[in-house]
Image (cartoon, grey):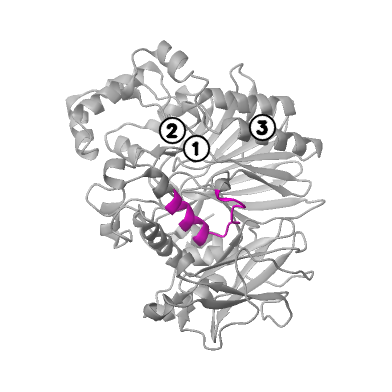
Amino acid sequence: MKHLMRVKHASNKNEALDNGRRDALGTLIKGSIFASFVSSPLAFTVERPYPYPPAVKFEHGVASGDPSEDGIVIWTRVSPINEKEATSRNIDVSWQLSIDRQFENPVSQGIYRTSKANDFCVKVLVEKLEAGQTYFYKFQVGAVESPIGTTKTLPTGSLEKLRVAVVSCANFPFGYFNVYDHISRRLDIDFVLHLGDYLYEYGTAEGELGAKEGNRLNRPHIPANETITLSDYRQRHSQYKKELASQAVHAAHPFILIWDDHEFANNAYKDGAQNHSPETEGDWKKRKESALKAYFEWMPRREPKHNNDSVKAWKTYEFGDLASFICLETRLAVRDNEVLYQDGFSDRESFFQNTLGDESRQYIGPKQQDFVADALLKSRQRDKPWQILVNQCTMARLHMPDLSPYLSESIIDELEIALHPAPREHIVQYLSMTKFDLPFNLDAWDGYPHERELLYNAIQKTDAKVLVLTGDTHAFMTNTLYDNKGQRRGIELGTSSITSESYIMEIFKAVGIDFPTMATEINREIDYYNAFARGYIDLTLSKEKAIANYISVSTIEDEEYQTNSERKLRIRDSLEGLVYEVM
């Protein structure tokens, strides 16, 4: 089934915002029945606004997320027209929630005071709501109103069905957010589950990831430099939130969010990142704190209770008697730096036993392991049919196929051009090493096998029915997970990206190397690997089964696009554990 989508272009910015609200949001919001509630702010509120509000615009839309059964975060940002005036005063922003889209019967309202100190963002935690209900919300400064958003709380009790859109990896310069646009137009989605890489840190200099594509599509990153300071990260969040498709999907659906690495820097870990050089970019701790501050300002997520809790982002979302969504944090809390082959690979046996096999190396750590085990146990004790692990990087074992037959001068010449400035000897070394049956991505769970086995032990002990949802790879994947004893421990669904390309896969494809097909053939756990489609997973859970529909968009280089179902699965429980069939 294919759908044709068009986005209307406006002659000026204000008209564009109006058209975006009307076209992308107008058909999405329907009425429902609500209970009354009271509110609790995330930060400072006041009883009455200043009598002379400054002139502002709502350039970044509205958003909501981080739901509980009795609460939700609502978000916007005000853009002062007179920046000089704005830097010297606070801005009072009124907000309302209503049982109807016309706001004839508002059930809660308040005033949030924002300022330059939090980049003029507005974030309110509304509490004591009724479970499983939909609410409308908006913001206002003087006579200027924001777009209207719709949101909902988590359900309790008996739940027959839940439908979520699973997304990951939006890199602005690579193309338009058509995936967001398509999801925003769907009335049947309950929540959007974002698995991280909401934005990317790279700049526009030659050789930076996405720089060439951004220049070609006239979508360069802002600021032009790599994001390092608080101001840099704020500007980058602003750019992504100004995209109309992003505004549409946030206004249409509440988000459940986890972060991965690019919200900070590529391959981030507790003490640094692959894409961080202390000699030229300063202290990693300061950069990480700047990225975290901007993230919590700009995203509809609850504030950490204490500063030390900001990286302890693991939590569980309960969906009635149907499912537990257990969200992992695999980056900033305890993760040790990844192993690099070039730093110490001598022979395969030693590498697996002494390097990857080092049980002291942490990925999520003992506290989070205990948290996950407890969440799995409680979910099973409540007879919930689904335990969902919300995860960043691939959990399945994915080893490299043997690419040494491609060690020809002509192919190496082509790869050297495509991978510039990578040294030729590194390319030769990489192709040569693939004959040793080694893990493809040591930044994923394959680089921390002891931690993965501890997790599988918890799954086995609790008899959990685990479905793992994974992003990061920019590929659609279906994986069957096995522990070290060969016992089935769950099924992993990998969603592709919103715009980010599978860069190395595209390069391999250009020289005749079909890496995904070859990897599927040699890896027991990899059942399906599609690295060349951009899209999302439409996941529907019911008591007896789950339906996973891998939906792609035909292009990200034009705002006119089609959608297609790449693969559709029916997943169910069996005596062997979770199994699936292709529909």
Q: Residues within 10 Å of mark 3 (few under 14, many from 20)?
A: some
Q: Quadrant of residue 218?
A: bottom left
> Residue 443's mark?
2
Q: CA distance from mark 1 to mark 2?
A: 8 Å
Q: Which residues are magenta?
A: 289-307
Q: Is residue 173 left or right of residue 38?
A: left
- What kind of residue is marked 2? Asp
Q: Which numbered disc flags the more N-terminal residue, 1 or 2?
A: 1
List x then y, in percent, for residue 581. Answer: 63, 35
Q: Residue at 75% across / 34% down in the picture?
A: 377
Disc 3: which residue:
370
List x then y, in percent, for residue 129. Answer: 75, 64
Q: Residue at 46% across / 84% down in the picture?
A: 55
Callout 1: helix, strand or loop? loop
Q: Residue at 28% across / 58% down in the picture?
A: 224
User: Does the CB distance between marks 1 and 2 fall below 8 Å?
Assistant: yes
Disc 1: which residue:
393
